[in-house]
Image (cartoon, rainbow, N blue to C red):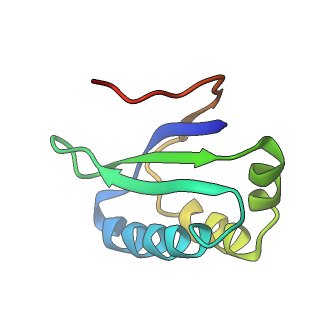
Amino acid sequence: MIVIAGKVAVRHERRDEAVRAALAMAEATRKEAGCIAYQFSSDLADPDTIYIFEEWESGEDLARHFQTQHMRVFREQIAGLLAGPPAIKRYSIESVSAMT
């Protein structure tokens, strides 16, 4: 499994646009083969910080995701809405178990 996790800072005055773009992106991405989870969330202390969390069955699924039309559109939309560079990491997960 591949996990993508990180955060981006959005420009305060353009936050609503960023949210709309993120919601559209999440809706389209969740329909992709290999997508286990795909979500954006706001920081409770700083609503202009948006967290990204994705789970993918494989690296190949993630690679296909980066080639989709909705990813191209999202990248174009979000470019002018960010307040700084994204801080996003890719993790290769060997095993997963529930916390008890």
Q: Which residue is drawn at 43% across and 72% down?
A: 23
Q: Residue at x 54, y 48 (%)?
A: 54
Q: In this view, does 32 lie to the left or right of 86?
A: right
Q: Dividing the image into 4 quarters, which one contains the N terminus?
A: top right
Residue closest to the far left: 45
Where is residue 46, by image quadrant? top left
Camera-side residue of 30 and 19:
30
Where is residue 89, by image quadrant? top right
Q: Is residue 94 above or below residue 39?
A: above
Q: In this view, does 32 lie to the left or right of 17?
A: right
The percent position of residue 67, horizontal first and vertical second, equals 82, 63
Q: Residue at x 84, y 48 (%)?
A: 60
The percent position of residue 84, horizontal first and vertical second, equals 48, 43
The percent position of residue 83, horizontal first and vertical second, equals 43, 49
Q: Residue at x 46, y 47 (%)?
A: 52
The percent position of residue 24, horizontal first and vertical second, equals 50, 77
Q: Dividing the image into 4 quarters, which one contains the C terminus?
A: top left
